[in-house]
Every structure is written in structure tokens, then in C-alpha cells.
Image: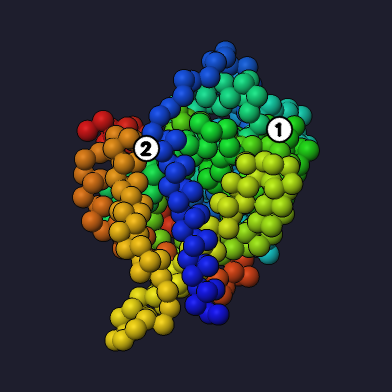
Amino acid sequence: MLDNILLGLQIIIALIGAYQLVLTFFGWYRRKNKANHAPQKTFAVLVAAHNEEQVVGALIDNLKNLDYPKELYDIFVICDNCSDHTAQIARDMGVHACERHNPKLRGKGYAIEWMLKELWKMPRQYDAVVMFDADNLVSTDYLKHMNDDLCNGSKVIQAYLDTKNPHDSWITAAYAVTYWYCNRLWQLPRTNLGLANYLGGTGMCFDTNLLKDMGWGATSLVEDLEFTMRCVMRGVNPTFNYDAKVFDEKPLTFKASARQRLRWMQGHFNVARRYFFPLLWKGLKEGSWSKIDTAIYAVNVYNLFIGSILTVVLWIDLSIPGVPNFTSLFQISPNFFAVFSVLTYAQFVIALILEKAPWRSYKYLVTFPLFLLSWWPITFYAFFTQNNKQWSHTEHTRVIRLEDVQSKQAS
């Protein structure tokens, strides 16, 4: 009985993995760009910040120099429970410093919800709202691309997420590889197939009327995933703009990375519990591939959790002398399993090639499997601590400006 259950779980996880592997082939090409439009949409540019005095100035300077009419956008820095000079820096640089003090409701989701309510009260109203983290940098044509997508009918848009410090350590390099992979072989295939894309927490753009109608309501540890689920449930598919680039700073050390990823996985478990079955049922009932695909994405955290446990159990079982107690897919078809495993890892290499990643990024593929394996204990611990909603802040070590990122990309 137990052997049949374990085999059944292996088959389900393998099928989901095969499904994702097939989807990646649809990211090997890019469709022609959509129609361009003259600048016409107005934007409220929100910057979520908690004690970000070291990096917020570089982003504000970046945002003030976007290639978009200055009268069509305003910058608002959400100074959320700050105890440093973040607010003063924002005021000194001539942008709106919106200070929020609520230590009981901490975290980006709560800060955004508060800011949107404040924004709706203001005399000037905007066509769209865009959101960044204080440690980001933005391509100068970002708002042009958002304007085009909004004019072309998109209501929720995710920009291309890149890393601004990909070669600071093997950890930041692992994040960079993951981002290139996700942009090219997760997001772009769904764009090409007309499926829903996923919000990535920053570089997001929202139609104002949709935000007012839906409300923010995303206050989990992964507010981006939560809002994605809410949108798809309503039949609003977020879209992906490959050309609008946002550069995100990544933690340098394994410890800081593990803390950040633990928070993500705790939030993912929470969102999966709430949205997987409703989305799956609605997708099956309506015959909506987008809803079914998004439900599968939501439950991936459980696939990783169960898959890691199964793998460890089967490894132990196979290593014990004598006849194995449990049937594994590897035993049934070792050649197929080996090919599937190689193809799965080869996706990351292919992503680097397609994205024209710097050559020195390839050397980090040697340590990248360690980063992938580290998700197992993090996910395991997250499962048993998923009710923890304590938000944690990522420390920043130095200032990087857009010209620094661009010069490194060119070299």
C-alpha cells in the first residue's frame, strides 16, 4: 500500500516536471513586439523602503532620469517603519516621502496597501501604478514599455527581472542564473502561449481602475504571488514585458539568502493552501488552461517539499543492502530518468546561452547544484513554520548605480 502511494506521488511529480520541461521549448523564440504608442499614460511610481538610506538615493536618481515625460509621472517613497534617514533623503531629492508607522503590521504588502489608500485620496489621479523595491535599478525606457502595454490592453504587467550584482559571490551568481532561467524559460513561454505570467515582487505595473476595483488585499509574505492568484481567479492574466528591465540586488551570503528564501517559501505554502484547489476547480470547470497552469505553479512548493522527501527516502532505501522496499521510477526506467535529469539541468545552460549571459557566469554552474539542493532543507523547514508571518529585512552592503550595471553588462 505504502509502495503504491510513493510510486503514485513520483508519477505525479514527474508529470508536472515533464509539463514544465515541455513549456520551456516555447521560450526559445520571441514574438514580434506589439504596437508602440506615444507617451500618454500617467504613472504613480511607488518605492517600498524600510531603512534603505544606503541605496534609495541611487534608485531615486535613476527614476528621475527615465526617458519619459517628467510631467506624466510622480515618485513616492513609502518610508515604512523607518528609523534611519530614508525619508529625509527622499525629500532632499525632491520626491514624495510618505512615512508610515505601524510596527504591528510590518512588511511590504501592508505598506503597499496603506500607500494605495493614501494615493486614492490625493488630488491628482494616475492611469497606472508601478512598484519597485528601494534596492532596484530600472532601465531608462521602463515607463515607455509600460505605456505601450497599457495602451495595448494589459492591466497587470511584470517587467524582466535581472540581477544588479550577479558576480559578487557564488550566491548572487546562483540568483542571476535563476532569474535568466525564469525570464526566458518560465515567463516567456507563457507569454508566447497566451497564458498568465507571474508577478515577481518588483517592476510591476497595475492599471489604476483594476487596483481600485480589486483592492490590494495581498499582505502575505509573498504579496506578488498572492496578487497573481487573485488576478487569474478574476480572469485577468498578468503579462510579461521582456524589454523593460529591472535590476534587483541579491544577498551576498548563504545565510542571508537562506533567510530570504525561507520567507518566500513560508509565503508560498500559505498562498498554495488558499488558491490551489479553487483555481484548479475553476480552471477545469471553465476549460481555462491559464487557471490550471497557474494552479500548478501555486502548488509547486508542495511538489518541491514532497519530491525532496521522496528522493531522500528512495536514496536511503536503495543504499541499504538487499532488495529495495520501495519501487522508484529510476528502477523502472533508468535511461529515461537519466535523460530527464540531464535535460532538466541543461535548461539552465540553455537559458544562459539564450540570454547572452556574461561568460564568467558559466563558471558558477559548477556550484549552482548546491544552490538548488539547498532549497530542500529550506522548503522542509518552511513547511513546518509556514504560519510564521514575520517579515525580514535584507541588508545592503554597497551602492550600485545603473551606469555600473550597464558597463559590466557591456564588458
Q: Which residue is most to the top?
A: 38
Left or right? Give the position of 239 relative to 244: right
- Residue beneath disc 1: 208
Residue 130: x %, y % from top left: 59, 35
Give residue 52's position: percent from left, percent from top. Answer: 49, 50
- Looking at the image, which residue is at 21% across and 40% down? 359
Asked if residue 388 can be seen in this view, the reply is yes
**Dot 2, crowdedness within 10 Å: few (<14), some or many (≥20)?**
some
Q: Residues within 10 Å of mark 1 (few under 14, many from 20)?
A: many
Q: Nearer the viewer, residue 247 or 189?
A: 189
Classify the position of the C terminus by image quarter.
Answer: top left
Res. 407 mark:
none
Q: Is residue 304 left or right of residue 195?
A: left
- Note whether 257 is above or below 233 in the view shown: below
Residue named by callout 2: 401
Judge whether 318 appears above or below 108 on screen: below
Q: Amino acid at mark 1?
A: Thr
Q: CA distance from mark 2 to mark 1?
A: 30 Å
Position in image of residue 21 (x %, y %): 43, 47
Instruction: Classify the position of the N terminus by image quarter.
Output: bottom right
Q: Residue at x 30, y 81 (%)?
A: 319
